[in-house]
Amino acid sequence: MNRRQPVFRRSFQLLFGLVLWAAQDGYAQFDVNTIPSPKDTGQEYYVSNPSGILSQTTVDSLNRLAHIVDSLTSSELAVVVVDDFAGDDDFQFALDLFNAWRIGKAGSDNGLLLFVGTEKRAYRFITGYGMETVLPDALLKRIGETLLVPKFRAGDYDGGVLAAMDAVQTVVLNPSTAGDLRRNLARKNSFFYRHQIPLLSFALAFMLYGLLWRITSRAFNRIPTRSGRKPARTPTGLYLVFGGVALFLFGFFSIFLIVFVGMPPWWLYRWSYLPLYVAVFFGLGITALYFKGLSLIQKTYVDAANRLEAMANFNKRMLLPILATPLCWLLLYLATRWGKGDQLRLVPPQGGGWQRIDRDKQKDVSRYLDRGQRKEESVGALVYEIWTREGPGGIHPVAFPGKNFSKYGLCPSCGYHTFSNTFLKVVKRPTVIDEGEGERLQECSNCKHSVSHGRVVLSRTKPIRSSSGGSRPSSSSSSPGSSGSSSSNSGSWGGGRSGGGGAGGRW
């Protein structure tokens, strides 16, 4: 047993060391000395891709592109793409790498380096002294911001590097095209060109939902009164506040997610989301106004048939807004269920010759309903459909559950559905010093018959107190680590130099 323990310990230490080495290698930061030079592979290679970020097809295309430039103009173009590099200054790192490799021909200093660090989301063009007149800093900046950055933001590193280096090749091979390229890039880099699709989508969505909002407003204002007259026009713009409040809350919580959770801002805020914001703004307003219209119909009409007709006309006018607003689908479903309940109320009793009383036109129903039945309707326990016909027994009220049906039961005294559920009646109000007294009762709204279920003691009220509290901020920090590896050089570049010309940025 004692002999096996050292063997086990050594095996565990070896395994732990391999895992630690693999982890360090996976998250290594390159420095100038550890980035492999493409000239180690051969004189016709110009791309260093140690992290494997670029595809092999892209690397081959870039090598062919740079070799053509080198053979025709003797200018040397180098591309370096790594996941991370030591330090935070991408300019100084790229400049040191340029001068360490001596990109460009000696005496001409006609070299260019495109350096990309994906972890720090930084890119940098470095030009030799002789290349600064061909590729000025301003032109390289436009190339980077117009051709490289948008594709990098979309995760397309292959497309970004190829587009940028293709523009560089065009200018180096034919410097007279620099003016045309500059004007073309300026046009592409303009605000409206870069965001033309989101802006056009925003304008189209705004016009579409603005039209749907107008349709909704007109449908709401065409809901007739109980007497059938056209109502006075009601301002509806206030209901758009619901959409504005929703966007405000979204902005507030998005700040929380960005600051405290660390969510990238471009996950929540993109130009392509503009049509969605319009849909939310108008969609919530349309939903609120549609709900208000349904509620108004329910409140305005007592008669089930009139309510069904008004609901059908309102939904017909709201067809397009409902189709474009998913939240309205739920309200439409609820309205359909209400309608089925109203349709059941229109079924006549058995036998022929029955005529239904229009409850919106017949306000006084005392000749059809007795005092108890009218009280059932007034408290909302039951509602009645009144059917009449010629001859004896020609009045036939049919009861249906009202909106407060569950709050009332049958009165043991008068027999009407007006006996309330148990409630607490305060006999003596409690104070801070003395307890109070209450009685649990059931009472009939029709005959005033009541049943007591005993008295209860009410606890003393609590005095009003104020409290305050505070919080103290906390902070956290982190520091990056770095590691390196060694490489050997079997070849060299042309011996060019750079004084720091070029351009760069972050995405």
Image (tube, rainbow, N blue to C red):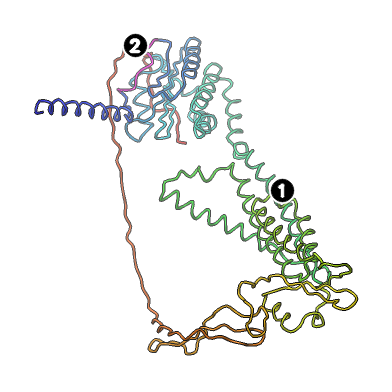
Q: Viewer-nearest of labels 1 and 2?
A: 1
Say what amino acid the circle numbered 2 marks.
Answer: Gly
Residue range in magenta is 33-42
- The disc placed on residue 208 is 1
Q: Position of residue 23 (x, y in %)?
A: 30, 30
Q: To which quarter of the image does residue 334 belong?
A: bottom right
Q: Which residue is mark 2?
A: 491
At a point 82% along the width and 82% down the height, the residue shown is 367
Specify whether residue 41 is painted magenta: yes
Disc 1 to disc 2, how far (Cα)?
Answer: 64 Å
SS class of the residue under badge 1?
helix
Q: Position of residue 31 (x, y in %)?
A: 31, 27
At a point 31% along the width and 29% down the height, the residue shown is 28
Specify whether residue 62 is painted magenta: no
Task: Point out the image quarter for the N terminus.
Answer: top left
Say what amino acid the circle numbered 1 marks.
Answer: Leu
Main secondary structure of the magenta stretch: loop
Q: Is residue 495 left or right of residue 178?
A: left
Task: Please tell me whether residue 436 is drawn above or below residue 339 in the rendered image.
Answer: below
Task: Please tell me whether residue 286 is drawn above or below residue 433 in the rendered image.
Answer: above
Decide which of 125, 232 is in the foreground and name it.
Answer: 232
Q: Is residue 38 left or right of residue 165?
A: left
Q: Are marks 1 and 2 in contact (CB under 8 Å)?
A: no
At a point 53% along the width and 57% down the height, the residue shown is 249
